Each structure stands twice: as structure tokens, then as C-alpha cells.
Image (cartoon, rainbow, N blue to C red):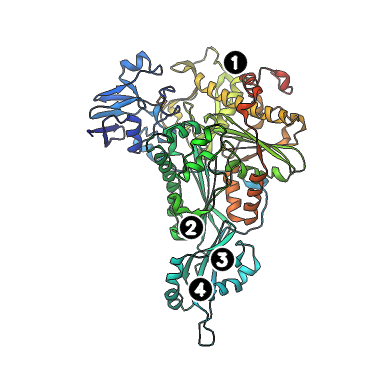
Amino acid sequence: MKKFKVTFYPDNLTIEVNKDTTILSAAITAGIYINSVCGGDGVCGRCKVVLRKGKVICSSSAALTKDDKEKNIYLACLSTIHSDLEVEIPVSSRLNLERMVSPELKGLYSKSEDIELVKPKDQQEFSYAPLAKKIYIQLRRPSTNDNLSDLERLYQGIQLSPEVKQSTLVAGIENIQTSLSNIKQLGELLRDSEWKITVSIGERNNNSEIIAIEPQNTTKRIYGFAFDIGTTTISGQLIDLDLNKVLGTRASYNKQASFGSDVITRIIYAQEKDGLEKLHMAVIETVDEIIQDLVQEHKIDLNDLLYVVTSGNTTMIHLLLNIDPANIRREPYTPTVNFAPTIRAVEAGININPRGLIFCVPGIASYVGGDITAGVLSSGLYRQEDLGLFIDIGTNGEVVLGDREFLVSCAASAGPAFEGSGVACGMRASRGAIQKLKIGRGTKVSYSTIAGDRPRGICGSGYIDLLAEMLRCGVMDKDGKIKNTRNSLIRDGQMGKEFVIVPAAESASGEDILINEADIENLKRAKAAIYAACSILVRQMNFEFSQLKKIFIAGGFGTYLDIENAIQIGLLPDLKRPKFRFIGNSAIAGARQILISLEAKKEAEEIARKMTCMELSTEPQYMDEYMAALFFPHTDLTKFPSLVL
Ligand code: FES
């Protein structure tokens, strides 16, 4: 097969690829992540690149304008390589955090970053009993009168250990298991360490398993990771399992985003040659980077990292475990697995202690995954006497209705706009994201950013404020069109009219931070999908919104979400404001609770067994509800009586 060299700018990275490879695939191989909202169908137009030199063959697409063609702009996903190439990837085509606009800003765009989370004051409390524990044991030396074998002596030592007697830290010590490799090293290790050892025990499928045996006392060195594998964002927390303390939290864009922005495009991609392996490797790389970042920062030995608990939607968990997700989108929409067994993390490709374990929070159905189980666990909805609603605003908008008697869920495809993807200046809730915003006199915008950094983009909560403020001050009409006010901040752009929020001189990238009409359309569709899902679920279960006593709002919004503004734009139902609780990223909160509590793990499994799922695509009224919600706040204003419009 003929090979060609491709050089990407401004990265100045050259790789060699086979003839007929697409520029998009070549970029992924080079570690450069290009927007690919439609998954390479040539529809979204987000993967535009400039061909500086060389020859490509590109199928025609309506996503390319005449102007693009004149400027030698091609779609990376449809352009196959037929000579050595030089390709420039503009900022607008890169996944948001990879914007390398100037060398001095490079540090700002590191692959994973600190994130702030909502303080867990509203979370459920569980007894502290982590899924992995180290126990220090001093065994009696054998003698002619006491000739128990080494392994039996070890088991006896574990059973007599005061820590094991006092706590529920491991599941049933009677059925303790270990591996041949541990047994093989046991004789020498016990004698070399003078019978003083530390045993690491982990919970594995309701049994206790010896993960490792070390000489001397290392009980202070035991760590675990909680992850939320989102379609757009992956968040991870390093937990000290001895002190029950979060040492750090990081988030990063899921590298799979280059293969499509939603789960459907990823499932389709997984069917292509090597597609599943590439998607699997992309998620593993992202997870590994987060682990490496935090482990290095806290100077932790990977061998002391013993347990990972991860939540994630059903497709993400399949791809993490390298399981073909094809059946998730085929009728009758049955995934390969909802309750994945606890396995060695290394089997999934995750680099921790080679015998460390991974537990995936069980899911409910193809489109309601373990992230929702973890969220419901964390919110406490399943323990409530009164009827409540749990809404997770993410790439999929999942909704759960219920109380301690029943739980019913559904999922709507909202798209990643509120996660800062698929919108021109969107970004995750991390440093420099505009998270609060007000429009004052003369459309002057005041804002605050996460960590007080110079603004780099707008995150979900910033967009909610922005839409509400644009409506309030008349910059945008109820259909989402930017109005022609005589204002220097409003101008015509490629994607319709645009409103400049932060001028280039003030922003971290040196480029305007703005919203355009295409962004507003994306955000409007996302909010309509979520509102319609809530409305249908409540109605189909023969309830009314007014009967809800508590509404939990979850999502990767960082530490802030203005409920009033979310109601103003019609994202949330118009109910008494004190009923709402913003609980942040509840999926990672639930994963962390499971990691540190066997009780929480059992409750999560019970939630997943109990929750039923309503399939919205078979609900004939869903489309009507969705269409009616494609307005700010809604076409039927009687549903929003408290709003002064
Ligand atoms: Fe290329 Fe959508 S047009 S990824």
C-alpha cells in the first residue's frame, strides 16, 4: 500500500499514512482532535481544514460553501489522501480545549484540567467501608507444633485481624479468594518480611479477593479512582481510601469526540474496520491521562492504586470494556451488558496495580446507563417519600421520576450544547469558562469565569444565563433569532447573526467570544428535548408537574446553575423555585460514594434492578411535546405562568 506524509499546522506534526486514509483519521492518528459532530457523514461542516499543499479526493457536500472551495477548504472527514499533504487545522475545527492559538497560551490547554464540583451537602450519607482495604498483619511463625500452611496461616491472620472483625469493609471474608501468582510468592515473602505483611483486599462480585501482599506496613498507601465516562467529558477523582479524602478532580474531553459527538455516531463508527478498537483506545487514553496527571501530582505509586469505580452511559461502558455496542441501536435496543462483572482494570486496558479491580456502576437500559444509577444514588431520590424528578443535563438528557416505591426513567437525545460542544465558543465547566453572566445597559455584558481566569469560552450555565439575558433585554426573540438592534456587538457572521460577549482584546485566546444563531438553535433543541422528556414522563405516569416535591438537577455545570434562568428559557418546568436542587455532576459523586462504601454499592445495584425505562421513540406524543418546546420558553405560555414576558 502506498504511503504519504501529512504535516499538520500549526502543530507542525508530520505522520505517515496509507493512501486513501481520510484527513480526519490521519489527524486522530497524529493525536490531533478535530470536531466531528456528525461522525464523518459530511453533514455538520465542523471538520473544515485548509489544504496548503498536495492532492486529496473529496466527495461533494452541502456543508462546503463556494467561498470555502475558493479558499481551498475541505472537509477532513470526506477528503482522502492522494499525495504528501500540508494541512492547516483552524481553531474553529478543533475540539475546544485543543485551541493552540498562541505559544504563550499553550499551558492553558492542557489535556486534562482541575474542575470544581458542587459541594456535596445534599448527598446521601453512607457508612465508610471502601471497596478496597489494606490490612496489616503480624502472623505467628510456624513451628513443629503449629505447622499450618502459609496460605491457611494468612487466611487465619486476616480473619483474626481486628479491622476485619470490626468493619464491613470487604464482602464476606469467609469466601476470600486469591490468585496463584500471590500464592507462588507467599513463602518467600512471609519469611523475608519476618511474617509482618500488608494484605490488600478488594470486593469482587460479592466476594473478597486478595489483590496484593506486601512486606511491612503500607496501610497508609491505598488509593482509588472514581470516574464518570461521559460522551463529551470524562471526569476522574483520586481518592485516598485510608483517609476517605478526595485528593484531586480532573476532567478532559473524551477523545472519542473525534469520531462523532453522540452515542449513535460512535456506535456506527464502532462497526467500521478497527472502529471499536479505536474508540476503546480513545477512551482508555483519556482515562489514563487523568490517572497519570493526578498520580504524578500526588506522587503516588500506581501499585497503590487498587480500585476504580466508573459510571457512564451504556454505550460508553461498552466502549470502555471494548464490547461491541451494535445492539444498543438495533431494535429491541438490548445492550450486551447492564450489570458488568467486576474485573481486573488491566483487562479493560486501565493502568493501575496489575491486579487492581474495576467496577462499572450498573445501567438500566441501552439509553439509561450507570451514570443515572449513580446520580439517583447520590441525589437520594430513591429514598424519598414524596414524588421527585431527577434530570441529568448532558449529551443525553436523562430523566427519572419516582420515590422510594418506584423509579421510571427515559432518555432524550439533547446533544452536547450544554456541555460546551457543538457551539462556537462553548467549553467545559473548567478554568476560564464564563459560568455567570448578565447583560446591562446598552447590552454591556458582565460575567464571571471559573477560577477568575481570563475568559476562554462559555460553559453550560453561562449559556443558560446568556439566553435568558438576551431574551430579557430584547437581543434575541422567542424563536431564537438575534434582533437587529443598532449595536456594534451584533453583526452578520457565517452562521447567521452573532452577538459578541467578550471582545478579542479581553479574551484569553485573543479572539472574540460570541454566540451565533446556529448556537442558539443547538441550545434551543437541547432544552426542548429535555423539557419534552420531563413532560412526557410525568404525564405518562399519570402525574402532573405540580405534584413534584423535589427536582434534582444534575450536569457538568461546575459549581453554579441559575435555576430561575433555566426556567426563563424553558429548560426546566415552571415550579416553585425552592423545589429545585442543583447537585452538579452526580454521576461522579455516586461513583465516589460506591468506591468508599459497600452499602452504597449494594443500593446502586438495587436502584438499577428496580428502575424501569420508558422508550421515548415509541411515544407518539414525544415529537409534539418537543416541537412545542422549540421556543423560548415554550409555545404554550400557560405552562409558564410565573414568567413575566
Ligand atoms: Fe466532517 Fe461532520 S462534516 S465530521
Placement of 278 over or under 24, stated as above or below: below
- Identity of the amino acid at label 3? Ile
Tell me the amino acid under the disc marked 2.
Answer: Gly
Residue marked by disc 3: 176
Residue bearing the label numbered 1: 477
| Mark 1 sits near ligand 1, with its Cβ under 8 Å away | no
Based on the displayed image, in which of its 4 quarters is residue 624 positioned? top right
Identify the mark nearer the N-term, 2 or 4.
4
Rounded to the nearest whole Å, what is the CA distance between mark 4 and mark 1?
74 Å
The 10 Å Cα crowd at callout 1, few under 14, some 14 to 19, many 20 or more, is some
Is mark 1 in CB contact (under 8 Å) with mark 2?
no
Q: Circle 2 sits on which residue?
A: 356
Q: Nearer the viewer, residue 302 or 499?
A: 302
Q: Which residue is under mark 4? A: 151
Between marks 1 and 2 in the image, the one whose residue lies nearer the viewer: 2
Viewer-nearest of discs 2 and 4: 4
Secondary structure beneath dot 2 equals loop
Q: Is mark 4 within 8 Å of ligand 1?
A: no
- Alpha carbon of mark 2 to alpha carbon of mark 4: how far? 20 Å
